[in-house]
Each structure stands twice: as C-alpha cells, then as structure tokens.
Amino acid sequence: MDAALAQTLATRHGTPFYAYDLGVVKDRAQQLFLALPSGASICYSFKANPMPAIASAVREAGCRAEITSQGELAAAQVAGFTGAQMLFGGPGKTREEIITAIQAGIRLFSCESFRDLALLASLAAAEKITFQVLLRVNPAEAPDARLAMSGVESQFGFEESLLTDPAARQRVLLPGLDVCGIHIYFGTQVAGVDAVVANTRRAIAAAERVQAALGFECRILNAGGGFPWPYANDHTPPDLSDLREKLTTVWQSSPLAQAGAQIWFESGRYLCAGSGWLVAQVLEAKALANKTFIILDTGIHHLGGMAGLGRVPRGAVTVQNLSRDVSGEPPISVDLVGPLCTPLDCLARGLKIPPVTEGDLIGIPNVGAYGITASLLGFLSHPPPLEIAHENGQEREIWRLRYGHERHSS
Ligand SMILES: Cc1ncc(COP(=O)(O)O)c(C=O)c1O
C-alpha cells in the first residue's frame, strides 16, 4: 500500500480501515478474462466481498453476479447489476429469498436439490414465469482443491448418482423450469493452472454424463473456478499465463462446446483479494520476558472469521509499516493481537517483523476478499472499520457496514 495515501486516509478518517484499489479490481478482471477461453463468462461471487464499489468495478469489467442471499442481492442492485445479469444459488434457499430474487428480475437459479426444484416450480406456476435452472452437481470424482466442496459427501448440490438415476428425470424436468445447464464448484484456492484445467475437464465430463442421463440440452456449463490468491500475506500470486490455451483446448474438444454451449466460471478472491489492505494502528507494544504482544486497533472482528475457522495459518500474515522505513532494522518475534477480551483475538503468532512502536500505522495486504464480511463483526461491539474505495490515489466511495441492535417491531 502506498504509505502516503495510507497516512492521508488515516488522518482524514481515523483507523482502522479497509482500503480497496478499484484499479486493481478492474485489472484483475481483465487478467482473468484473458486467462479463460474467448467468450467465457465470469460470475463475480459476492461472498468474497459485497462492497458495492468493488462489485460495480467488476460489473464495469464485464462480469455477471453470483449471489446467494437477499443482502448480496441488495448489494448487487446498488452496484448496478440487473436481474438478467444475476445467478441466484446456494444451499437451503427460502421461499422468501426466491420471491425477492424474482421481484428483482432474476430468472436464472442454481438448484441444489429436488426441494429447490420443487419450490422454484411452484413459484413458476404461481407467477406464470419460466425460470432457467442450472443443476448444481457434486461430481462423483474428487477435485484438485485445497478446500474441496465436491467429490466428497457435502451439503452442496446433487450427488451425481442422484441425477443419473432414471427416476430423477420426472423430479427434475418440471413444468415452468427450463433446465439449461450444469453448475459445479469444486472448491477454492485451487493450486494452479493444471489443477484448474483438470477440474474443468472433470466438470465437462460430469455435465455430459448428467445431460445424457436426463436428456436435456446443456446450454451453459458453469465450471466454477477456485482461482487462487494469497490471503493476508505478500506471497507470490499464481501465474495463469498458459491457462487460456490449455482450457481452450479442453473446452473446444468437448461435445458441449461443439453443440454451442457457453462456458462460465465463478470467482471471488482472484478478482478482489489483491485490491484490499487492512490499515490499523499500533495501540501498544507490550514486551514481556519471553514474548512481545503488539496490540492493534483491529483484530479477528475485522479480519479473522477465516483465521477463526482455522483457514488462515496465524504465522502467514505480512505486515507493512506504513509510518516509517524499517527495512534495515533486525526483526523481532511478536504476536499480533487485537483489542477483544479473548486470547483468540490474534492475527499472527510468532511473526518476525522489524520493531513497531505505539502509534505506528501498519498494513496487511491481500485482504480484499473474505476480509470484513467473513469476520466476527458483532463480537464485543466495536464499530466496523470504514471501507474506502480509491483509484489513482483518489478516494472514490466510502462505506461502513451497519452494526449494533435495532429494535424489532412485529
Ligand atoms: C459456489 C461458490 N462459487 C464461488 C465461490 C468463490 O470462491 P473464490 O472466492 O475462491 O473464487 C465459492 C466460495 O466458497 C462458492 O462456494
């Protein structure tokens, strides 16, 4: 993060805050389009970061929206997505959510179960609308992914064997539903080009099997993605330079592509992780006999849902000192902790960094995805940090998530 910009924003707005560079979001979207077969669609997964300025940047770059809740739908609307640009998915959909989505003009749904299909078909009859449906399939074959969400028993999608059973047809091809494609999401942080290609090959094969068994025309294959990006550290991002060529070969040789189907991918973290920094202030440096605790004005309530879930190794965080040039100073070992009243409020343990002192501004990179909205925001009721979108060194939009209780009147 540019230290001068961080200082300016901190003076103007206080700390902590998330700073997102919209130029980086747009670049990353362009890079991803260039890494995929020509004509491929990218759906932006709002779960990575629903902040409207970011979503608007990916929309301007040509992406669709992949949403799973009424909150994500509201954010997508603020960001300028139309109903026709949105895909509504996720397990355990409620009738109320689907009705809200329909009212917003959404006509494309990813269905994960026979219950989802029956619910949507009943609303199709009531509203006299035909909905397009992607069947989310959990393929029999295990994927290449660090966090696999298919190929193992899971709550996501139809087990492939359920759909290839001859009895499935009458429960899937329901009146009011235009079953037009397959949706497969293998998992996140897929290791690199060869793993993405292998997963896409598996997705194509599974889609062909399900299409043949059910006898519908698969016009869209949403092959997921899981495109990787470092989280909260400055490790080297993936090199996707030969992905386009390899994926194009795999896709174009498939009967689906030859019959004119479209290929779609989904991405959250690859598009926005690199745009975001969490900027915070050192409140106290507490040097004890064997340990130094650096107490920040941020912690797991702002960055750490994922650490809390054990998904972020607590040593793999990078800290940049934005107040001073400390490059020549010998590192010390610190625990980077927050202000919450629990020893679990720890962003990094045994981290080797040059000494920091009270009042220093520090920055944590690559937290534009799964940062604030994946955190324990309500815990201990500290205010959420501001989210500042900037471009070319200028502030563009500032947002803050709501918090605290509001009285409910029924
Ligand atoms: C169905 C689905 N699509 C897309 C994503 C986005 O993944 P990523 O942010 O790693 O691209 C997820 C993440 O869990 C997901 O579950």
Image: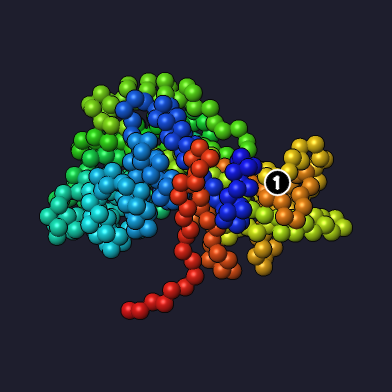
The three-letter amino acid code for the residue at tag 1 is Ser
Residue at 47% of width from left, 22% of height from top?
242
Name the foreground residue: 213 vs 240. 240
Q: Is residue 160 visible?
A: no
Name the foreground residue: 82 vs 190. 82
Q: Quadrant of residue 39?
A: top left
Residue lying at the far right in this picture: please name it.
289
Residue 14 appears at what percent x and percent y? 60, 57
Vertical arrangement, residue 35 with respect to residue 128, above or below: above
Residue at 71% of width from left, 51% of height from top?
360
Residue 163 relative to residue 151: left or right: left
Residue 253 relative to residue 239: left or right: left
Residue 51 appears at what percent x and percent y? 44, 51
Under circle 1, the secondary element is: loop
Q: Quadrant of residue 100?
A: bottom left
Q: How is the image coloured?
A: rainbow
Residue corresponding to mark 1: 323
Residue lying at the far bottom in this picture: please name it.
409
Location of the C terminus by quadrant is: bottom left
